[in-house]
Image (cartoon, rainbow, N blue to C red):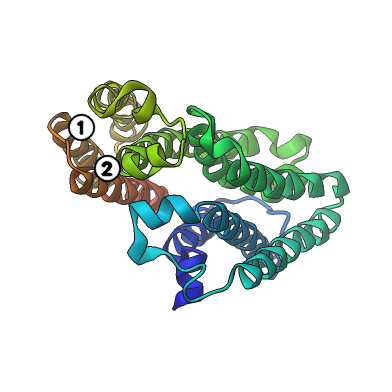
Amino acid sequence: MKHLKLIRYQNLLLLALMQLIFRYGFLKQQNVYLALADWQYILFVVSTICIAAGGYIINNIFDYKTDMENKPEAVVIGKSISESLAYNLYAGFTIIGVGIGFYLSNVIQKPTFATIFVVVASTLYVYATSLKQSLLIGNIIVAMLLSFSLIMIGIFDLYPATYEGNQSIMRLLFSILLDYAIFAFMINLIREIIKDLEDVNGDYNQGMKTLPIILGTERTAKLVFGLSFIPILSLMCYINFYVFNSGLFLSTIYGIIFILTPMIYFTVKLWSAKKKSDFKHLSIVLKWVLLFGILSIAVITYNMPHHA
């Protein structure tokens, strides 16, 4: 269990679920050829999980002092696992992830694509060692990396299988992946700032320059309150124009109940949030919004044949 805490297994499960749902709950239901065989796609998921696990480990190593103040009960390094073992685990996960990436890049006959895995792993290391302490840059990088894991599905599964005869359908599928990637980016960027609000005391004592430290907790909360209207309005437009107007009523109800309503709840609760427990609760709400948002692609895909 201590090793699972180190790699934040809940987040890794969410990442794996996201990539599996988009492959088997969406792309596999379309009448298109995909570049990766099923077992190769499983390797692709394993690769992204390993690189992400390495990122969490190196982040835990360099975040040790901050975590001791913010959440000492969750600290593993130095207690259950030595720092040297943590470094070895980081190296092992990262090498496996990047190695599988090299293999898959050659499988789809795009060997230069292997640099994507190297860049992602390097970015996670730089984030943990230096960028995390920079104003907003760390938040943006974390949000971008999760959303990019969706775009990578298109890069490795759609793009290599695209030819002149299927360009229009492949472009449409890739644009849907991009829509969800943008949604994931917005939710995760807001969630990262909320986590900074939750950890403001420990971050301040460690000399970090997060948004709540620069602007203050109250001003940052009000700023996020304003930012939260962007995904809310985007969701309302998307549900109305692309789901409801297509006659997908089951998907419309799902989107309103499980995605839009929790997002509105988040915004309402944020206005009066002040305590660490308030921000922790709001962070969990956003994680549920992200989960149900990911699941919506399978709901929409299921709903479409019934509508037809």
Residue 55 is situated, as x and y percent measured from the top left of the image, at 60, 54
Q: Is residue 31 above or below residue 237?
A: below
Q: Residues within 10 Å of mark 2 (few under 14, many from 20)?
A: many
Residue 164 appears in the picture as rendered: yes
Left or right of 129, for residue 92: right
Residue 23 is situated, as x and y percent measured from the top left of the image, at 55, 56
Residue 306 appears in the picture as rendered: no
Residue, disc 1: 267
Left or right of 244, for residue 277: left
* Amino acid type at mark 2: Ile
Q: Earlier in the sequence, mark 1 or mark 2?
A: 2
Quick one: quadrant of the N terminus? Answer: bottom left
Q: Is residue 241 above or below residue 173?
A: above
Residue 78 is situated, as x and y percent measured from the top left of the image, at 51, 69
User: What residue lies at 22% left-to-right and 49% top-to-bottom?
Assistant: 281
Q: Which mark is residue 259?
A: 2
User: What residue lies at 26% left-to-right and 29% top-to-bottom?
Assistant: 217
User: Which sits in the foreground, 300 or 98?
Assistant: 98
Does dot 1 land on a helix, a strand or a loop?
helix
Left or right of 152, for residue 135: left
Q: Is residue 198 above or below residue 215?
A: below
Q: CA distance from mark 1 to mark 2?
A: 13 Å
Residue 260 is situated, as x and y percent measured from the top left of the image, at 24, 37
